[in-house]
Amino acid sequence: MSVRSNVAPSTIGVDFVEGGVVVEYLDGRDVFYHGPPKPVEESIKTPPGKEVHVLVTDPDGIEGVMTYVNDHNTHDDILESTGVGRVMLEGDDEEVLFPGVTVSTEAYSIRVDADLSLVDGRVFVFAEDELSEHAYELVEHVEREDDSSTAEADTTGANGEQNEADGSNDADGNTETGSTDWG
């Protein structure tokens, strides 16, 4: 396998639709992330071994930047043509993806932290593999009457709700638009 490098992201389109988030790549393709994203307070430690994609949107949620974390599969030229960025972390590396958004490694998991006072938009984290998809939105405060915890980042990812996927993120034909109660 060839060595992968960091790739800077470009601004890409975003659409909140019923059931998830559509990311509109620069090459014209759309990718659907199942949701709605689970609100988590300011940081998340993803389940181990998942592919992790971080999306930071503008305040209106119309466009944003997407970065893959530790993606060993996608060639640089494909990322550049889609507008998706990539950051490679080793050991206990930490990297700023966007002002206020930091990623780091914790064993086989990725930790995403957001200082939302510095982010002029929304922060989403998607963690997936062939068996499941997890979608999170990092928020300042989670308001739940039945939740005695405040979404501890170290346990929410591993024990949080799962959104089962059909194994495909391709939204070909499934990019209907519409308002959502979370979008």
Image (cartoon, rainbow, N blue to C red):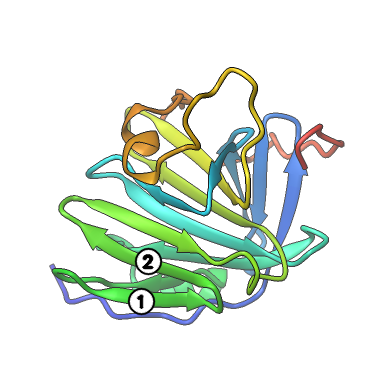
List x then y, in percent, for residue 13.
72, 62
Residue with the most extreme right position? 179
Residue with the most extreme front position? 148
Query: Would residue 114 appear left or right of 48 to someone viewing this image?
Result: right
Going from N to C along the chain, the mark reached first, 2 or 1, is: 1
What amino acid is labelled 1 in the image?
Answer: Glu
Query: 138 above or below 158?
Result: below
Asked whether residue 29 is in view, the answer is yes
Residue ID at (81%, 34%): 180
Query: Residue under circle 2?
Result: 103
- Answer few, some or many: residues within 10 Å of disc 2's Cα (few below 14, many 20 plus, some between 14 and 19): many
Query: 65 above or below 41?
Result: below
Residue ID at (39%, 45%): 153
Along the line of sight, which residue is nearer the eye, 132 or 172? 132
List x then y, in percent, for residue 63.
73, 65
Query: 124 above or below 2?
Result: above
Q: Callout 2: helix, strand or loop? A: strand
Query: 17 above or below 119?
Result: above
List x then y, in percent, for residue 128.
38, 40
Residue ID at (47%, 66%): 67
Pointer 2 with pointer 1, Cβ within 8 A? yes
List x then y, in percent, for residue 6.
34, 80
Task: Identify the image quadrant of residue 102.
Answer: bottom left
Residue with the most extreme top position? 146
The quadrant of the rendering that contains the N terminus is bottom left
Q: How many marks?
A: 2
Q: CA distance from mark 2 to mark 1?
A: 5 Å
Query: Residue under circle 1?
Result: 95
Along the line of sight, which residue is nearer the eye, 79 or 115? 115
